[in-house]
């Protein structure tokens, strides 16, 4: 992987991690369409480590919320009333929603790595993302706020996040869809999606770091990866701000159309090749 490739892919990661168009799909398809021959182990580790950049972006963006949630959780435990405060309750629901993706990711890690090497599989999953977004717009009543979230909602959204470990299934798209199907309004579904991304992205980054240590040549391309991580952090911060404003006034249809078109074009190109 070259420095130019890392920066370009970092920009793509920052834009697509939070928009419901699947960052993993773009990190698989863009190198394939441009003919970049990036070694599989470098591509996989870059795809995971670059999420540390967008993780930094979401932590920075929601730093005030995260401080309030953490403080409320600690106070709740100290008072032996862990669910008494709304912020404490939200924090525990975020952790609960993280469990399905964490468990599934550990169970099928090898299959996920194989999927990252398949543009055809990625394209199909991208079309699935389009279907999820359209389903959310059709079925969601958008009548509930984040204050109304229950443990059933959290598990449902967590299960939605679990399927996003495959490239092409947008994490933000699947979790926003999960929230909207439970009738959350778009901004509330988006906010919970971003907050619940923090534990799973942190865990994925730590696991990738362990894989990185086991690769003898990892040190050679680590500086190149860091450049992509820094770019992804900056672009990701701007993407969060833009999407939250967008969700307040617009439907997800435009993202569904984009995913369907990109998936279809990729299938056609793969077939022609």
Image: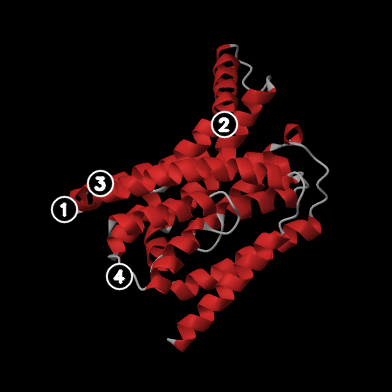
Structural crowding at the residue carrying mark 4, measured as other residues with C-alpha within 10 Å and reported as few (<14), some (14–19) or many (≥20): few
The residue under the point 54% across, 48% down is 100
Q: CA distance from mark 2 to mark 1?
A: 37 Å
Question: Dot 1: few (<14), some (14–19), or many (≥20) neighbours within 10 Å?
Answer: few
177 and 219: which is toward the camera: 219
Question: Residue 62: which disc?
Answer: 2
Above/below status of 127 relative to 83: below
Q: CB of mark 2 within 8 Å of CB of mark 1?
A: no
Lower position in the chain sequence, tag 2 or tag 3: 2
State how far apart marks 1 and 4 are (Cα).
20 Å
Instruction: Residue under label 3, please give it.
Output: 223
Label 1 sits on residue: 216
Mark 2 element type? loop
The image's mark for residue 37 is 4
Residue at mark 4 to residue at mark 3: CA–CA distance: 19 Å
Judged left or right of residue 184, residue 242 is left
The image position of residue 6, as x and y in percent, is: 34, 55
| Marks 1 and 4, the one that precedes in the sequence | 4
Sequence-first disc among 2 and 4:
4
Helix, strand or loop at mark 3? helix
Which residue is rendered at x = 50% and y = 33% of the image? 59
Nearer mark to the viewer, of 1 and 4? 4
| Quarter-of-image position of residue 262 | bottom right
């Amino acid at each position: 992987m070259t420095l130019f490739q890392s920066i370009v892919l970092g920009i793509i990661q920052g834009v697509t991690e939070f928009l419901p168009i699947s960052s993993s799909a773009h990190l698989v398809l863009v190198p394939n369409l441009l003919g970049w021959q990036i070694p599989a182990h470098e591509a996989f580790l870059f795809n995971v480590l670059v999420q540390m950049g967008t993780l930094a972006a979401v932590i920075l963006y929601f730093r005030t919320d995260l401080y309030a949630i953490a403080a409320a959780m600690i106070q709740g435990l100290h008072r032996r009333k862990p669910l008494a405060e709304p912020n404490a309750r939200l924090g525990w629901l975020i952790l609960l929603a993280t469990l399905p993706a964490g468990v599934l990711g550990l169970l099928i890690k090898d299959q996920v790595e194989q999927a990252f090497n398949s543009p055809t599989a990625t394209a199909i999953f991208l079309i699935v993302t389009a279907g999820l977004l359209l389903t959310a717009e059709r079925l969601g009543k958008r009548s509930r706020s984040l204050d109304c979230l229950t443990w059933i909602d959290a598990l449902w959204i967590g299960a939605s996040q679990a399927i996003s470990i495959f490239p092409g299934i947008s994490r933000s798209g699947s979790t926003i869809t999960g929230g909207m199907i439970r009738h959350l309004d778009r901004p509330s579904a988006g906010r919970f999606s971003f907050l619940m991304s923090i534990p799973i992205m942190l865990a994925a980054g730590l696991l990738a770091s362990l894989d990185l240590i086991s690769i003898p040549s990892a040190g050679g391309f680590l500086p190149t990866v860091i450049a992509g991580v820094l770019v992804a952090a900056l672009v990701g911060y701007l993407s969060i701000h833009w999407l939250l404003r967008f969700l307040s006034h617009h439907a997800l249809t435009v993202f569904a159309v984009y995913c369907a078109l990109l998936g279809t074009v990729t299938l056609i190109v793969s077939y022609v090749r």
